[in-house]
Amino acid sequence: MSIVQEGNEFDLFITDLNGNLRGKRIPASGLKGVMTQGVNLPQSVIGFDHWGDDVVENGLVFETGDSDGICLPVHADPITVPWAAEPRDQILAMMYNPDGTPFMCDPRQILNNIVERFKTLGYTPVVATELEFYLLDGDSESKKRPAEPTMTEGSRSTLTQTDCYSIEEMDGLTGFFTDVRNACDEQGIPADTIISELGPGQFEINMNHTSNAVQAADHANLFKRLVKGVARTHGFGATFMAKPYPQKSGNGFHVHFSLIDNDGKNVFDDGTEKGSELLRRAVAGLLNRMSDSMLIFAPHLNSYRRFQLGTHAPTFASWGYENRTVSVRIPESPCVARRIEHRVSGADANPYLVLAAVLGAALYGIEQKLSPPSPIEGDAYALADQHETLPNRWELASESFKDSSFVKDYLGESFVRVFAAAKEQEQSKIFSQISNVEYEAYL
């Protein structure tokens, strides 16, 4: 944490439904007013499409006179931005209606509401996230095309080969990862292990578990900005795009969670490796409502390129014990740490919405007292033709999302309206373009 010094600027931002940060850069002299009164931004900002354009169909623009919401800080002090060229801080905010009630299209408010629903049952989610990303050549951002990074440290000139779990590959990037670790420490982000992943130049950084699910999403959100910022200072680019390379591993966003009761006991633990009945009800809810939330887990056209057989990205709703080919995995662990891992989302997804959809589906299974099918042993991909696939195209996911009574009941009708409108506008824009491959194939 830091206090904004005289002459410094700070960024205040909210997170829109696409996970993009929207806000204002403010001089230090405005800090006191911001911390007590917040900042006004149009509520329609939450529902922008991916490129920051108004989505007229969402009901937040002309129907409301494009009226403001109030964005209030969610932490007591500004957070330093250690990678900035000039001293700067940042403040994460959440949007409220002018009367002080939560604005329920704000993704952070949506997740907070799900957490509160758990609390009425006497449970608190304990959450950890895992985010994968690619380091890129420094020119990739300006060229809008991914390329393997040119190494400035270590023995390799470029990262072009898969070297999963390689310590040597991370040795070659010691300066970068040291700065990432230090920036996480300065921002209070509980970064844990660093892993070299399946793709060349692909890495994963895991977060420690926290009993504040909203804060876990804050950490994931700020971490994505941090990695990109630190990468630039080392002459790299970085991307959380779901599938930046057609023939290489995609970037996933895995969520681990358990539930504790008011006495701090993990209610997924019954003293056995199988876990409690409550765990199985949560699993059943996740499987039952997975298709409904696919637009959240895979929000962009590119997101659906991850879901291919044999790629460690699931293609149908499935679960199993210590099995990385399924969509919901129960990791091997001491009984006291019994938990669920949700393996569907891409790293391009909005962390608040992902956690809201995952926890909401688990809550649904618990409330409805659902039972899951038998867990899958072995290769789930070999059984794919025996199961209904998850929505595997952007448009199909949009239809499942809009038709879902679960999403409306647990995440909110206003959210469904605004998010669906943004996605449909993005689909219209992208599908109206003619790609280079079409010209090459058909002209």
Image (cartoon, rainbow, N blue to C red):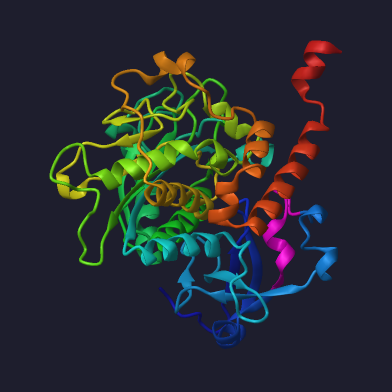
Q: Quadrant of the C terminus?
A: top right
Which stretch appears magenta?
Answer: 41-52
Residue 49: within the magenta?
yes
Image x and y of residue 150, in percent: 49, 34
| Observer-nearest of 95 and 75 | 95
Image x and y of residue 173, in percent: 37, 41
Residue at x-position 38% and y-position 66% = 120
Residue 189 image-quadrant placement: bottom left
Residue 183 image-quadrant placement: bottom left
Residue at x-position 68% and y-position 37% = 399
When the figure is inspected, residue 377 is found, relative to residue 228, above or below; the finding is above
When the figure is inspected, residue 436 is found, relative to residue 3, above or below; the finding is above
When the figure is inspected, residue 158 is found, relative to residue 367, above or below; the finding is above
When the figure is inspected, residue 119 is found, relative to residue 432, above or below; the finding is below
Q: Quadrant of the N terminus?
A: bottom left
Residue at x-position 67% and y-position 42% = 142
Residue 416: within the magenta?
no
Q: Is residue 363 left or right of residue 378?
A: right
Residue at x-position 49% and y-position 65% = 81
| Observer-nearest of 331 and 37 | 331
